Amino acid sequence: MGRVFDHAFGISTVDAVYDREMQTSVHVVVESGRAVIIDSATAPAVPRVLGALAAKGVPPEAVDYVILTHVHLDHAGGAGQFLARCPNARLTVHPRGARHLIDPSRLLAATVAIYGEAATRKTYGEVLPAAADRLTETPEGASLRWQGREFRFFDTPGHARHHCVVQDSASGHVFAGDSFGLSYRELDRDGRQFVLPTTSPSQFDPPALHASIDRIAALGPEAVYVAHFGRVTQIARLAADLHRLVEAHVALALRFAHRGADRVARLQEGVAAIVLEERERQGWRLAPAALLDLLALDVALNAQGLDAWLDAARR
Ligand SMILES: [Zn+2]
């Protein structure tokens, strides 16, 4: 069973353990013995989540929905496995993501291209397709009624074009996937949390991401749940930090717009420099080397995403 962090309103964060512990969360909402799962994480995380629900007295048959914020494999890879094990669950997804769940071969091929066959298999396990008749598409304005609460969906491109966020009527809180940055508990200082944007491949879109951050903040949530990792508060302050840091990433990318073969390596140095500068500004206590170690995967992915964005802008 995965480590579980219980919040208010029946909402909990289950540690899905992706690259490391407390890196990727699966959020669950439990009400009257029934459950909704928000983001599935990877197939190997599925038993962790079902174990955490069992400990709350919720069997697989009582899972009503698996809600996906977007179809990147670290968020959606386990969705088919949940459908196989939870016979009454329906899967919800942004309209742009639906076909990739019914046929996950393109998502898998893109991942194999980056990480190779063996590593993909080890990290993502068996990615099962989702049956089309168990899918519900959640475009802008969609809503789900469940156990006396309502989940409202908002289209939030910028990290990916197939991204939506969900606001829960009972708490007013928002489940933001990757649209409200990364926030790791290891960086917390005296109860204050911090964020970094994710600019990972291949659909980073700065103006859209700025608009999505504003949109989430304008919903006025007291708390936002991010996929990496857990629950954050003081949303207006974090939104301002995200805007500033997205612009720092854009400025970095534009400095290397015309560089050649070593561009990804230069971008990676640049993202690391942004992270270290933020460490100074915010007074993070983690030593520089430990910080870069903690964020190694994110720094690499942000650099790759900026590289892809520069390529797309040239076309
Ligand atoms: Zn993502």
Image: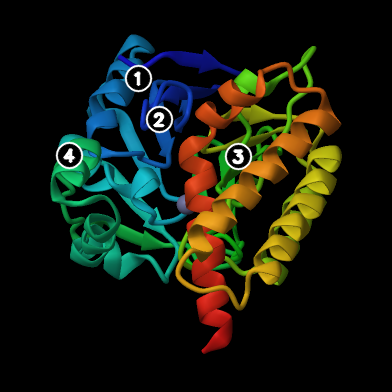
Q: Earlier in the sequence, mark 3 or mark 4?
A: 4
Contact, mark 1 vs mark 3 (Cβ under 8 Å) = no
Helix, strand, or loop for circle 1?
Answer: helix
Task: Give the label, 2 or 4, closer to the camera.
Answer: 4
- Where is residue 63? Give x, y as percent: 32, 33
Helix, strand, or loop for circle 4?
Answer: loop
Helix, strand, or loop for circle 3?
Answer: loop
Query: Which residue is at 21% across, 46% downward?
Result: 120
Contact, mark 1 vs mark 4 (Cβ under 8 Å) = no
Does the beta carbon at disc 3 come under 8 Å from ligand 1?
no
Contact, mark 2 vs mark 4 (Cβ under 8 Å) = no
Contact, mark 2 vs mark 3 (Cβ under 8 Å) = no
| Three-letter amino acid code at the position of disc 3 | Leu
Q: Which residue is mark 2?
A: 35
| Three-letter amino acid code at the position of disc 1 | Leu
Contact, mark 2 vs mark 1 (Cβ under 8 Å) = yes
Task: Give the label, 2 or 1, closer to the camera.
Answer: 1
Instruction: Work out how far the residue at label 2 is from the one at label 4, CA to CA, in angstroms.
Output: 24 Å
**Residue 159, quarter of the rendered image:** bottom right
Task: Classify 10 Å Cα crowding around label 1: few (below 14), some (14-19), many (20 and above).
Answer: many
Above or below for 228 versus 5: below
Does the beta carbon at disc 1 come under 8 Å from ligand 1?
no
Does the beta carbon at disc 2 come under 8 Å from ligand 1?
no
Q: Which residue is mark 1?
A: 53
